[in-house]
Image (cartoon, rainbow, N blue to C red):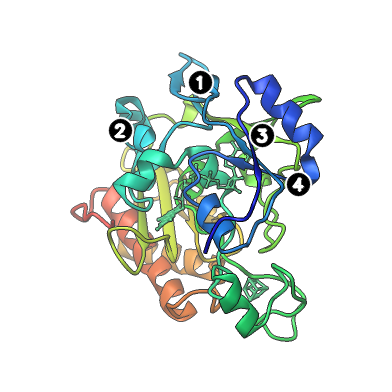
Amino acid sequence: MSLPQFTLLRPRTLQEAVGALGKHASNIRVLAGGTDLIPSMRQKLFEPKYVLDIRQLAELKGVYHHPGGGVSIGALSTLTSVEHSEFLRKHYPVLSEAAATVASPVLRNMGTIGGNICLDTRCLWYNQSLTWRKGCGFCIKKDGDLCHVAPGGTKCWAAFSGDTPAALLCLNAEIELASESGVRRMPLRDFYTGLGDTYRTLQPAELLTRVFLPESLADYRGAYRKLRVRGSIDYPLAGVAVVMKRSNGQVADVQIALTAVNPAPVLVKGIQQLLHGKAVDDQLADAAAVLAAKTAKPLTTSALTPEYRREMIRVFTKRVLLEISGQWPVVSGR
Ligand SMILES: Cc1cc2nc3c(=O)[nH]c(=O)nc-3n(C[C@H](O)[C@H](O)[C@H](O)COP(=O)(O)OP(=O)(O)OC[C@H]3O[C@@H](n4cnc5c(N)ncnc54)[C@H](O)[C@@H]3O)c2cc1C
Ligand code: SF4
C-alpha cells in the first residue's frame, strides 16, 4: 500500500494554486488535510502525476461573520475549528454537530471542510486495495465496466459519505470555486450530480475556496444524527440533518437533508409542505420520517444492509424532529 510516485507542488498564493491547476488540470489532485486523499492514493484509486498541497494558503482558513451578510468559512478550515467555533455552535448548531461526528479527533484536526464537501463517494467494492479490486474484478467507478452492486446496470451507485454537506444543504449554503478564469459562486445543492462516479461538478482546474451560510438561517434549531459501525471513527452509513424555525409552537421553516444513503447528499422534498404551520407531534413526526426514508435509496455499497440504513433514516428523522421541537429529551446520536 505504498504511495504512487508524484510531484508535490506547494503554492504560496491562491493565484499560484489556480495557475498550477490550470497547467496540470488533466493530471493533478488537490491535497487539503489529506485524510481521504492519501489513503485513496495508497489504494491506487488515484495516481496523479502532480499533487497540489494547498495547506499554506492562509487566506482559505477561518470562520468570519459578516454582520448582515452571513458567514464565510474558508475551505481549509479544519473540522475541529468548525466544531469548536463558538459562533457556529451558537448560531448554526447543525453544522458544528455534523463536524463533531466526522471520523476521530486526530482526523478532524487534519481534515478540512473543503475536503469534506469534495469527498469521493464510497463503496464496498471500490474502497479497497488494488490487489483486492484486481481479485474481485474492477467496476465502473474505476477501471472496469460492470457494477457489482447493481449487476446489469450502467450506473455507479457509490454513496456520498461526508457528514457536513447534509448540514450545509439544510442551511442553504453556497460555495465559491476559483480557477484561472475567475471565481464562481453556486448553491451547494447544485455541486453534486447524483452519480456515484462523476459525483461533483467541480472542474479539474477549479479549487473550492469558501463556503457561505446565509444570515437568514442563523439561530434555527438544528441537529445531526448518524449511523456508523464504530462510534468513535467511522464514515456515516446513514445521516440526517434537520434545521427548524418555530413560531408560536408551529413550524415556520424546516429543512431535512440526508447523507450516505444516495450518491449525493440530498434535501428531502415536500417536507416544508408537510410540516409548515403545524405543531410537530408524534403522528406528524412519523409522516415526515416516512418521507425522509422514501428519499433514501441505499444499495449494498456497505457492510450494513440497505434496509437497516433506510430504517435508521426514518428513526433518526423522527427522533430529531421531536427533540428539536422540545418533545423528547435530546439524546446524542454520535
Ligand atoms: C478512518 C477514517 C474515518 C473517516 N470518517 C469520516 C466520517 O465519519 N465522516 C466524513 O465525512 N469523513 C470521514 N473521513 C474522511 C475524511 O477524513 C473527511 O471527509 C475530511 O473532511 C476530508 O478532508 P481533507 O481535508 O482531509 O480532504 P483531502 O483528503 O485532502 O481531500 C479529499 C478530496 O477532496 C479534494 N479537495 C480537498 N480540498 C479541496 C479544495 N479546497 N478544492 C478542491 N478539491 C479539494 C481532494 O482532491 C480529494 O479528492 C474519514 C477518513 C478516515 C481515514
Ligand atoms: S456502486 Fe458499482 S460501479 Fe459504483 S463503486 Fe460500487 S460496484 Fe463499483
- Nearest to N terminus: mark 1 or mark 2: 1
Disc 3 and disc 1: Cα gap in Å? 14 Å
Return the disc, 4 or 3, that comes first in the chain's sequence: 4
- Residue situated furthest top in the rendering: 67
Name the front one of labels 4 and 2. Answer: 4
Mark 1 to mark 2 CA distance (whole Å): 19 Å
Where residue 41 appears, as percent x and y from the top left, is 58, 56
Mark 1 or mark 2, whichever is nearer to me: 1
Q: Which residue is mark 3?
A: 207
Q: Is residue 169 visible?
A: no
Quadrant in the picture for residue 209: top right
Say what secondary structure mark 4 lies in.
helix
Q: Which residue is mark 1?
A: 58
Q: Secondary structure at mark 3?
A: strand
Kind of residue at disc 4: Asn
Rounded to the nearest whole Å, what is the CA distance between mark 1 and mark 4?
A: 25 Å
Check residue 130 in the rendering and tell me which mark sits there, or answer none. Answer: none
Q: Which residue is mark 4?
A: 27
The residue mark sitting in front, 1 or 4, is 4
State whether residue 218 is above or below residue 158: above
**Mark 1: which amino acid?**
Ala
Which quarter of the rendered image does ligand 2 occupy? bottom right
